Amino acid sequence: MFTDLINKGRLKSPWIMHFDCGSCNGCDIEVLACLTPMYDIERFGIVNVGNPKHADVLLVTGTVNHRNKHVLKNLYDQMPDPKAVIAIGACGLSGGIFREAYNVVGGVDKVIPVDVYVPGCPARPEAIIDGVVKALEAVKVKLGLTA
């Protein structure tokens, strides 16, 4: 799908950045599983980076709380346009089992705009990869590359 655009030179190799807002690490392990030889997301040219200034897609796991919401917003603001955000797991979508806690703001969309939601507790690596593909479609729309 997006590999056709990469091959035609219309879309550069997408770079992703992962930020854990404070999860149980179940979704984080599944995000890392996407990089293992079994799933090998890098075969599509997708690279995991540590600097938001180089990232096209932000993967966010865990519940957003009052302490990390500023960091999340700061990371989002540092990313160049066009960018996409993926909320991963029940905690990233709604706050999960912690949504009623006094310090939890809620899901990622309470702080920054979200393009793709990947449900699950934890989210499966296949679902995360599908979410990245959908996020890249959102980037294509923002670039005006779709009809």
Image (spheres, rainbow, N blue to C red):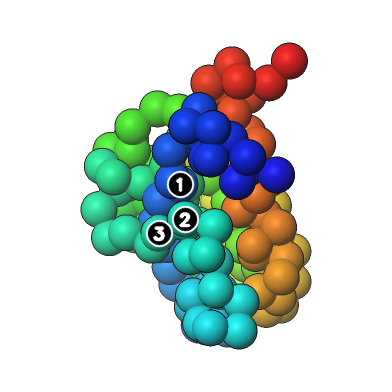
Residue 37: percent from left, percent from top: 53, 83
Q: Name the amino acid type tagged 1.
A: Pro
Query: Disc 2, disc 1: CB below 8 Å?
Result: yes
State the quadrant of the C terminus.
top right
Query: Disc 2, disc 3: CB below 8 Å?
Result: yes
Query: Gap in Å between the C-alphas at discs 2 and 3?
Result: 6 Å
- Which residue corresponds to mark 2? 45
Q: Name the amino acid type tagged 3.
A: Val
Residue 128: percent from left, percent from top: 65, 64
**On residue 14, which mark appears?**
1
Against 24, is 99 above or below?
above
Residue at disc 2, secondary structure: loop
- Which residue corresponds to mark 3? 47
Q: Which residue is drawn at 71% across and 57% down?
A: 130
Rendering quarter of residue 144: top right
Residue at disc 3, secondary structure: strand
Rendering quarter of residue 106: bottom right
Residue at disc 1, secondary structure: loop
**Comes first in the chain, label 2 or label 1:** 1
Q: Residue at x 48, y 65 (%)?
A: 42
Given residues 44 and 111, the one toward you in this image is: 44
Query: Disc 3, disc 1: CB below 8 Å?
Result: yes
Q: Can residue 119 be seen in this view?
A: yes
Q: Residue at x 40, y 59 (%)?
A: 47
Q: Can residue 109 be seen in this view?
A: no
State the quadrant of the N terminus.
top right
Given residues 7 and 32, the one toward you in this image is: 7
